[in-house]
Amino acid sequence: MKPNKVKVEVFVPLGSCVCNFAPLMEKVGQVTSKFKDFVEVQTKSTKSPEASKYGVQDMCVVVDGKIKLTPDFDEKDLEDAILKCGQAT
């Protein structure tokens, strides 16, 4: 990962049906595609060590380890979080 990229981690229940988290992934994809040279998207399990580190228990999106968004976030919220974290680098 380039140090100037904003890290977008999408936490989903990987053991469950993809239909449970497809809408979240689609929403993340729509937003991050606007910033494709600016972000790195990673999908992680809600049971992963990173999820524990952030206190994640359900689906969510964590931007640069700083901003946590619930699955019902507005696309503008994710855009704003990416831009805010990108300016800090």
Image (cartoon, helix red, strand yellow):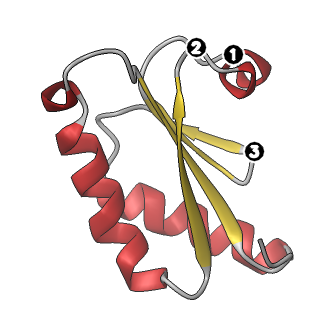
Residue identifier under label 2? 47
Mark 1 to mark 2 CA distance (whole Å): 10 Å
Tell me which corner region of the image, top left, top right, bottom left or bottom right, holds residue 37.
Answer: bottom right
In the rendered structure, the answer to whether residue 63 lies left or right of residue 58 reads right
In the rendered structure, the answer to whether residue 66 lies left or right of residue 18 reads right
- At a point 27% along the width and 16% down the height, the residue shown is 16
Q: Which mark is residue 65?
A: 3
Asked whether 34 or 72 is in front, the reply is 34
Q: Secondary structure at mark 2?
A: loop
Asked whether 75 or 55 is in front, the reply is 55
Mark 1: amino acid: Gly
Tell me if mark 1 has few (under 14), some (14-19) or many (20+) residues whose alpha carbon lies within 10 angstroms of its own. Answer: few
Mark 2 to mark 3 CA distance (whole Å): 17 Å
* Quadrant (top left/top right/bottom left/bottom right) for the C terminus: bottom right
Q: Looking at the picture, does residue 27 appear above or below residue 36?
A: above
Residue 78 at x, y = what percent? 45, 58
Q: Secondary structure at mark 3?
A: loop
Residue 38 at x, y = what percent? 61, 82
Tell me if mark 2 has few (under 14), some (14-19) or many (20+) residues whose alpha carbon lies within 10 angstroms of its own. Answer: some
Q: Which mark is residue 55?
A: 1
Of tags 1 and 2, the one toward the viewer is 2
Which residue reaches farthest bottom? 37
Q: Disc 2 or 3, which lies upstream in sequence?
A: 2
Mark 3 to mark 1 CA distance (whole Å): 11 Å
Q: Disc 1 or 2, which lies upstream in sequence?
A: 2
